[in-house]
Amino acid sequence: MRFLVAYQSIEGQTAKIAKFVEEELTSLGNDVIMFNTADAGPAPSFDEIDQIVLAAPVHERRHPQGFEVFLRANQDKLNARPTLFLSVSLNAAFHEGIPEANDYATEMKMRTGLNTTRDLLVAGAINTGEYDYYARQVLRWVVMRGRDFDTNVQQHEFTDWDVLRLAVTKFATEDVGTGS
Ligand SMILES: Cc1cc2nc3c(=O)[nH]c(=O)nc-3n(C[C@H](O)[C@H](O)[C@H](O)COP(=O)(O)O)c2cc1C
């Protein structure tokens, strides 16, 4: 099978997740085409693409604009194929954050007209060593709210790689149909 992995990343964690997905799919014997929706170049041809993995992070409640533009521009082609959407956020790391993480994905799909076959809310990462003052304040007061958040910890990865591997394997090996 031939897969397209279309992704965008702002701080790097979703790029790491997309690379992991590429390696998993390849190890299962598939061909994988990677496309970063932040790239200015032309979108890949969908002609020989069987299934699609979409991955994007949430920053201030929204997935990146370039990612949404890609979804809107290719809505028909995406909806005609099985798609697994990986929505990466910090809220996905916490039990009480799941409804909000779910809202990000639902609102994004309503805006773009995307009908996914499967969704996975993926917990992202914190990298305070690389954030400017504004980003640190957003994380502290908007995302983490009352949760324990040690700003001295430079990096913390919440991503559960085993759960991700399982979801990708199931998507690649089961008869998934399309979301439309
Ligand atoms: C400035 C900023 C804003 C963020 N806003 C949200 C948010 O609104 N909700 C959320 O759940 N996570 C939020 N996050 C957490 C990111 O989704 C998480 O760090 C993710 O791993 C980023 O992925 P990336 O490295 O691919 O950009 C935010 C992170 C930063 C730095």
Image (cartoon, helix red, strand yellow):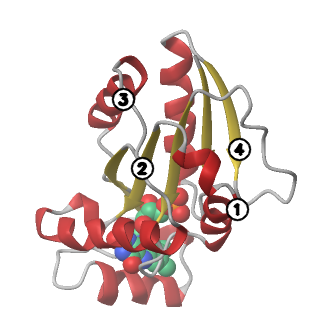
Q: Nearer the viewer, residue 60 or 52?
A: 52
Using a 10 Å C-alpha cutoff, classify the residue at mark 1 as few (fewer than 14 neighbours), some (14 to 19) or many (20 or more): few
Earlier residue among tags 2 and 4: 4
Q: Whole-percent x and y of residue 42?
A: 86, 51
Which residue is label 4 attached to?
35
Tell me the residue at 58%/27% (across/down).
50
Earlier residue among tags 1 and 3: 1
User: What element does badge 1 sit on?
Assistant: helix
The relative height of residue 137 versus residue 77 in the rendered view (above or below) is below
User: What element does badge 3 sit on?
Assistant: loop
Residue ranking furthest to the top: 29
Tell me the residue at 61%/56% (across/down).
75
> Disc number at residue 73?
1
Using a 10 Å C-alpha cutoff, classify the residue at mark 2 as few (fewer than 14 neighbours), some (14 to 19) or many (20 or more): many
The relative height of residue 106 versus residue 40 in the rendered view (above or below) is below
Q: Report the mark closest to the observer, 2 or 4.
A: 2
Tag 2–tag 4 contact (CB < 8 Å): no
Q: CA distance from mark 4 to mark 1?
A: 14 Å
Residue ranking furthest to the right: 41
Using a 10 Å C-alpha cutoff, classify the residue at mark 3 as few (fewer than 14 neighbours), some (14 to 19) or many (20 or more): some
Which residue is label 3 attached to?
176
**Three-letter amino acid code at the position of disc 4:** Phe
The answer to whether residue 9 shows anywhere in this view is yes
Q: Nearer the viewer, residue 153 or 13?
A: 13
User: 49 left or right of 90?
Assistant: right
Tag 2–tag 3 contact (CB < 8 Å): no
Earlier residue among tags 1 and 2: 1
**Three-letter amino acid code at the position of disc 3:** Val
Q: Whole-percent x and y of residue 138?
A: 41, 87
Q: CA distance from mark 2 to mark 4?
A: 18 Å
Q: Report the mark closest to the observer, 4 or 3.
A: 3
